Structure formats: C-alpha cells, structure tokens
Amino acid sequence: MKKIIHLTSQNCSLIMKVDKSPEILHWGAKINQIDPDIMLSTERPISQARLDVDVPLSLCPELGSGHFNAPGIEGHRDRYDWAPVFEVCSQEVLEQSVAFTLQDKVAKLQLEIEIKLDYESDVIQKRVKVTNIGAGDYYLTKLSSTLPVPNQANELMSFYGRWSREFQIHRQAFTHGGFMQENRRGRTSHENFPGMFVGTNHFNEQTGQVWGFHLGWSGNHQFRADVRSDGRRFVQAGELLLSGEVVLAETESYTTPWLYATYSAKGLNGISEGFHCFVRNNIIKFPVDKPRPVHLNTWEGIYFEHDPEYIMKMATEAEKMGVERFIIDDGWFVGRNGERTALGDWYLDEKKYPNGLEPVIKHVNDLGMEFGLWVEPEMISRESMLYREHPDWVLELKGYHQPSGRWQYLLDLQNPDCFNYLFNRLNTLLTVYNISYLKWDMNRELVQPGHEGKPAVNGQVNALYKLLDKLLTAHNEVEIESCASGGGRIDFEILKRTHRFWASDCNDALERQAIQRGMSYFFPPEVMGAHIGPDESHTTRRCHHINMRGMTALGGHMGVELDPVKVPKEEKQAFAKYIAIHKQYRQLLHTGRSFRLDMFDKGQNVYGVQNDNEMLITVCQLVMPDYALPSPLRISCIDSNAKYQVQLVEMPEASFQLMKQRPQWLDKTLTLSGDNLKEIGLTLPILDPESALMLYIKKIK
Ligand code: GLA
C-alpha cells in the first residue's frame, strides 16, 4: 500500500498520507514534487494534558479513536458497535482518483471512501459508503464526507434565504467553535443552500485563498465547519438522516451524496470558475451546439386564467419580440382554477381547451417556437380526482393531521402504483403533445414524510431521481427545468437530470441582482433561468425601468414572464432590444468564464463573462452611489499584454438627476491596452440607483 498519495489537477494538489486511516496532508496549491522527508516534516508533536497518541483528522474521523468533534460516522447495532474505529485494508490509486476500503472488525462495518480530482476544473468529489458486514441490523444515524482545510482558512461565507430571497450571503469569522447548517425541509430548500466557502482573511472575488464546498443532494442535509481546539479545522457535509431512516441489514449499504469541493488561490472567481467548468463538463446534459432558446412563460401574465385564443395571441406577440420557446404555466389541467385544487389530475382541462391543446401547440410551432408545459408531479390536492381514488398515496404518517402547504400534499413516490401512475401520465403528455420542455415544479416542504410509517426523505428523493431518469430515457430530447417555488431545489444532483433552474419567484430586478450573484458562485449563467417581469414586481410591488429588468435578465438563461398582449408598444420594443442583445452575446454568455469584480462602491454589482478574446461586463448600480464620482472600473482578469477595443453595449437613457454631462467615450470605441484597463481603469458614467450598463471588450492583438 502506498503511504503517500498525490493527486494533481491543473492548479491543485491533494496529498494524502495513509497509515491506519487515510488523512489529507495538503489540499491547495499545486506541489511539483513531494520531498522524501515529508513524513518527518509533517509529524505532529503530542501536546500535554491530552491523549498520549497522535489522532489524525482522517477522511472519516471517529469518536472511537479520540476525535472529539463531529464524527464522520454515527450509529449502533441495537446499542452496540456505536464507536467504530476503522483500519485501511486496501486502496486503489488511479491517475485522478483514489478509493480506500476500511474495516472495523469488531463492529463489523466496512467503509469505502472515494475521492476524485478533476484535472481541468480542480474540483474534488468525495463520497463514503458504509456496509454492514455483521449479523443484525445497523442503525445508521450519520455518515458524512469530511475534508480538512488549512489553518489560514479563518473566514467563512455561507448562504441563507427564503422564498423569493434565495442565495443571500452571510460572512463570519472561522477562528474558534464552528458553523452548523441543518436542513430538514425535505428538498434542497431556499433557506439552507448546501454550499459554503472558507478562506483567508478578507477573501473576496479577486483575491485570497478559498476552499469551496457543495453537497449534491436534493433532500435533507447537514453542513458543518469546525475549528478544533488544536487549531486544525474541517468542513463536513452529508445527508441529515431522520431517526430510523437508514437501517442496514447484513450486507446492506448506504452511500452518501457526492460532496464537491474546490480550491482557488484567486478568490471566489477561481471557485466559480472551477465549479462552472466541472458542471459544464460533467453534469449538464444540454446539447452543446444548440443555443438555449429565449422563453416566454405565461405565469405572471395570466396566472390561472387560460383562454386558448388569448394564449395564442400571447404567442404571436412573443414571437415578434424574439421569443423562441413558449411555456404554458400552471392552470391548464382539469379543474385547476386556483391553487387549492386538481394537483395530480394531469389531464387537459377540456372546458378551458375545448379544441384540445394541439391547436395552441401548432400555433406556437408554426411561429417557429418550441412549446413547454408546467407540471408539479410530486403533488396532490385533496380536491382532485386522484385524491378521491387514491387517498392512500399521500406521503404521510397515519394517525396525524399533516399541515398542508400551498393547500397541497406530497405523493409517496416509493409506492410503485403511484410511481407508475405519474410516469404514465407524464409519458403520455410527452408522447401525445409536441412538448420540448417541462417546467417541473415542487411547491411545498415535506412534513411527516412517511412511507409505510417509516421516515422517507431519502427514499422519496431517490424515487424522484428515478422518475426523472426514467422519463428522460423515454424522451431524451425533452428539457426539464427544476423549480421549487422558485429556487427551492437547486443543486448538482438534480441538475444531472434537469437542464436549468428557475432561480427565484422574485422577478424584482434589484432582488434578482443579489440572488443571481449568490447563485453564480456555483452555477454557470446558462442554467440560471432569468426572466423580465412586469414593471411592477408581483412579489415586492417595486417598479423598475425596463433597463434594469432587461439588463438583469439577459445575463442568465433569458426569458420574459408577463402578458405581451397587454404591455405597451414601447415596452415590447424594449424587450425585443434586450432579447436581441442576449442573442448577440449568447454564445459568450453561455460558454465563457464568469467573474465578479470587487468595487470600491459596495452599492455596485459588477460581473461579467469572458473567453480568450472577448468580455462582457455589466455594472449595476444597486443603491445611491457612495460618492459624487464613481471610481474607475479596473478589470483585474484582463490580459495585461493585449490590446482591446472597448464599447458600450447598453446603458439607461441619460439621466440629469445625477449626471449632467456624459463621458465622451460612451459614444466611441476605445482602444486600450490590458494593463491600462487593469491598473488605471475606465472612468464610468454616474448611474442612477437601480440601473445598469453593459460593456463589450474585444481583444485586437
Ligand atoms: C410556483 C413557481 C412559479 C409558478 C407557480 C405556478 O410558485 O415557482 O413560477 O410556476 O408555482 O403555480
């Protein structure tokens, strides 16, 4: 067995030492060559008044070996075998991965730890599997993936949120004690996004060493980061198991979700570059050569009021603005006249659509657009045909009154009859109608998720994955959007079987700037559904000029979410303009490297995307500028030795509130060298609060 294992990627090294258990010696900057003396140079002293042995912070720390912080595994065999200690019995080392098998011969448990390091993106994937190799059931209460981080990681950034306010950033010191996040909502959740970062003091977008983490799982999770009293620190993440949720009979196993992690020496921009590269190469299954079509979604336009003639008018107007895919949202199926009824009855409402859905789809297709439909398959309304026929299909604990959420309940996807019913209904819809896109919604949390009386979040989530996989096998040309009251189910594992996310129900462009910024650390723009909503936002009642709405939406996977028949002509022309800008730069936006810039004025959100030759930068003034004159835009990620042309793509019509004379360069094409743009910067015009401009920068030599 190798004592030292060294995996490398483009910019990183992961060095592990294998003794009785494997531990990470270094995860960070790339090391060219390991010195023969590394075993000696990394040997730890034993401190006074502690255990007399050195306790490694292993890949699965154990209470039984003297790790007094959160163990990587917890469980028992009817009150025995509760403090396992594992020893490595074999290892398989390949160029980019390592797999260890460990056993505890007393507790009769086997662990398999898999770690992969992706060369191109620097992303590590880690998961752990436990197998009961003894007689009698093993009650597993916790199995997590643990990764140590070096002591200089002493600041922590995590995300909080709620409906319509996803991906809000929280910073805190990471010097003593710990950080804990527990999600029991049964879906990825708006509240506890399963991701976080630790880094050196004041790490920001452009500078600092940062270690980033994301757990790819759409159910309950636990994230923690601890600083031990000896200064060593670690991040740990795994599924949060409900009491009795995983009981392993002899030979049975449980495997954790994948923990994704990456390291950057160039701040958060390096982290998002790594995650985006990994997601694009390994997770997204979107056809590479197809541009992502611009959407119009009917929800905020008509809600539950469906009149096919009117919907066709909406489609006609949408096409004129440049829309490429038209999606009918909630309200199309039998009896669905409001949010209290009909979920589960996935049959067309023939009262609303007396001639069927075909004429609408044909109209949409004849206009050259694709057609999409909203569904919420995991749900059931009490007022539905399905509930009348199968009240026993509800995911619940018998004998209790379960609170409804949005007046609805979950279906038990582990019930084979229920699973087959859903598959058949969806399969029929996709077979009968020319549907290229499903908006797959999930609008409530899991309370008392009982399958045959037993806790069933894990089983429910895995059954959902199975349903999606089965549907996509039958209809591999169909794209699916993951929506859960907006951004309630956004994670890498659901993205393996969906194609984009509805980032938030909040279409207020100001709020969206923050939501999309938070989301951009993990997900590339092409999977971030971003729509222009009505001028008055339906969630906040705040009003925004089309400049702010258009600029905010065009940086993601763009769409429009309103009634185009009702909006005035000038607004429609403006939508068409922003859609055209999006299409012009779509290739760059959806394949380039994203970045964010740290600005002197904290009220500005500045972000962009670049490839080797081009760059788009958006400057959004969120609130009143701090000073009368804006500070120059210094572009840190530009090539110092190259020459560039700089052009304004879009900015709000001149406002005389804050600026009476525009800088002349706004009407010209500038030629500037990279070092000028990096060090001297570009003097910006004064933007009103809640407005944005966009620049296009092209390398000329
Ligand atoms: C959820 C979604 C919305 C919309 C409605 C329809 O709230 O997030 O976008 O589809 O459901 O009921």
Image (cartoon, rainbow, N blue to C red):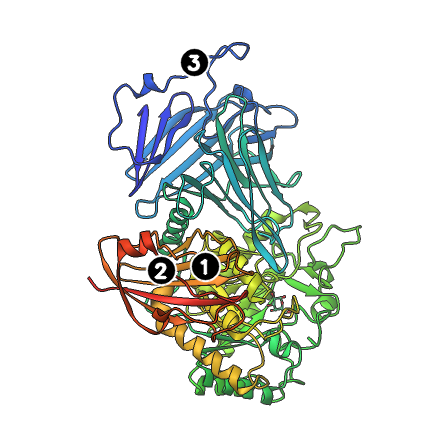
Q: Is residue 363 left or right of residue 221?
A: left
The image's mark for residue 196 is: none
N-terminal of the pair, mark 1 or mark 2, is 1
| Residue most extreme to the left | 701
Q: CA distance from mark 1 to mark 2?
A: 10 Å
Image x and y of residue 57, in percent: 47, 25
Image x and y of residue 486, in percent: 58, 62
Q: Nearer the viewer, residue 441 or 606?
A: 606
Q: Residues within 10 Å of mark 2 (few under 14, many from 20)?
A: some
For the residues carrying marks 3 and 2, which lies nearer the camera in this image? 2
To which residue does mark 2 refer? 682
Q: CA distance from mark 3 to mark 1?
A: 53 Å
Q: Name the kind of residue labelled 3 in the image.
A: Pro
- Label 1 residue SS: loop
The image's mark for residue 630 is: 1
The image's mark for residue 45 is: 3
Q: CA distance from mark 3 to mark 2?
A: 53 Å
- Up-down: is 69 above or below 526? above
- Label 3 residue SS: loop
